[in-house]
Amino acid sequence: MGECLPVSHQGPLSDWLGSTSMGRISSEDACDLLRRAGLAAGAVLGSGMEGVVVSLDADHVAKVWFDRPEDEVSRLKVFYDAAGRSSRLRLAEIERVISVDGHTVSVERLVAGRRLSEQPSGGQRTVTRATIDGLGDALDALAGVPRDPALSSLSILPGEPPFGPGAAFPESLAGLVRRRVPPVADSLDAVLGGTLASTMAQVQEELSELRPRREGLVHGDLIPDNVLLAGEGTPGVIDFGFLTTYGDPDFDVAVAPAIYDMYGPTAAENTRTLTEALAARFGTTKSTIATYRRAYALATAGCFGSGPEDGHFRWCAGQLGGLACGGEYP
């Protein structure tokens, strides 16, 4: 399957998110489950918050989903079928979806290539020319995917409906923010020093005034681990499903640099370097980047925890604290 996560991946947003049904099982139990289904389970390629990925042969992998129901993974298959019609991207292909002992299993054709992600020295990430070009090429390819209703069919976040093809992307994003903030409003307001209401009002106003310049496929979690390179050919892109929809490609231009290095000692420098490079390539304005980055922080602050004890929550609060920057990059 395309979504093969290395177990040691440092960013939370490329971990798969689940709801609450069967729950997590170990990699060993996932392999046993696959064998009971008659599949030749090989090496475990990755494990995240939503599933375990296991090699089947040189060209195929299986994913044992912890909580996703069969119909939801079947919708993901339709999504891949639609996105795969673009000749500018190499994507996973789900060949079949089955249910085994209460867990959904998808059998997928592997996306070949090496990950764009660097091997950090001492845990420190560094933005290279390869990072900039690789992410830029993937963003360009995603923006070139033609519209198809299936590309707006995935849950935008766990427990949330798809954005759907009808409303404008900023309008749908504003609605998502309004729905996602209340459960963490007290914690966010405390961290932001009582400014959550004004922050929300400003971001909502900015979204209402934002007019996308183009449309394309929004990945939502485009980090180097999710970009696969094969020589000089078409980029492979994996791990769709977190904020994935058909919408404004500038959203990915805004978010990708911010989530490249969320917690490292040089995170701010890396974010700025990537932001400036990608904004220059795609002509994305500083104000658009700031608006989308803050909307992202509001919408996802409660995805992994409900207060400052959670690292992602703290990171989101830090992004929102940049509201005083007057349109500069947070």
Image (cartoon, grey):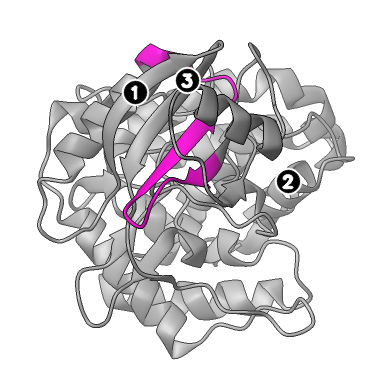
Residue tagged 3: 104
Identity of the residue drawn at 69% across and 37% down: 28
Q: Which mark is residue 59?
A: none
Q: Earlier in the sequence, mark 2 or mark 1?
A: 1
Q: Is residue 56 magenta?
A: yes
| Kind of element beneath mark 1 | strand
| Kind of element beneath mark 3 | strand
Q: Within 10 angstroms of label 1, few (less than 14), some, or many (20 or more) residues?
A: some
Residue placed most toward the observer, 168 or 324: 168
Q: Earlier in the sequence, mark 1 or mark 3?
A: 1
Q: Which three-letter amino acid code belongs to the residue tagged 2?
A: His
Residue tagged 1: 97
Report whether residue 295 is seen.
Answer: no
Q: Nearer the viewer, mark 2 or mark 1?
A: 1
Q: Distance between the Cα atoms at labels 1 and 3?
A: 7 Å
Q: Within 10 angstroms of label 3, few (less than 14), some, or many (20 or more) residues?
A: many
* Residue bounds of the magenta highlight: 53-71
Q: Earlier in the sequence, mark 2 or mark 3?
A: 3
Residue placed most toward the observer, 196 or 275: 275
Identity of the residue drawn at 36% across and 27% down: 172
Q: Quadrant of the N terminus?
A: top left
Q: Which mark is residue 312?
A: 2
- The residue at the far bottom in this view is 129
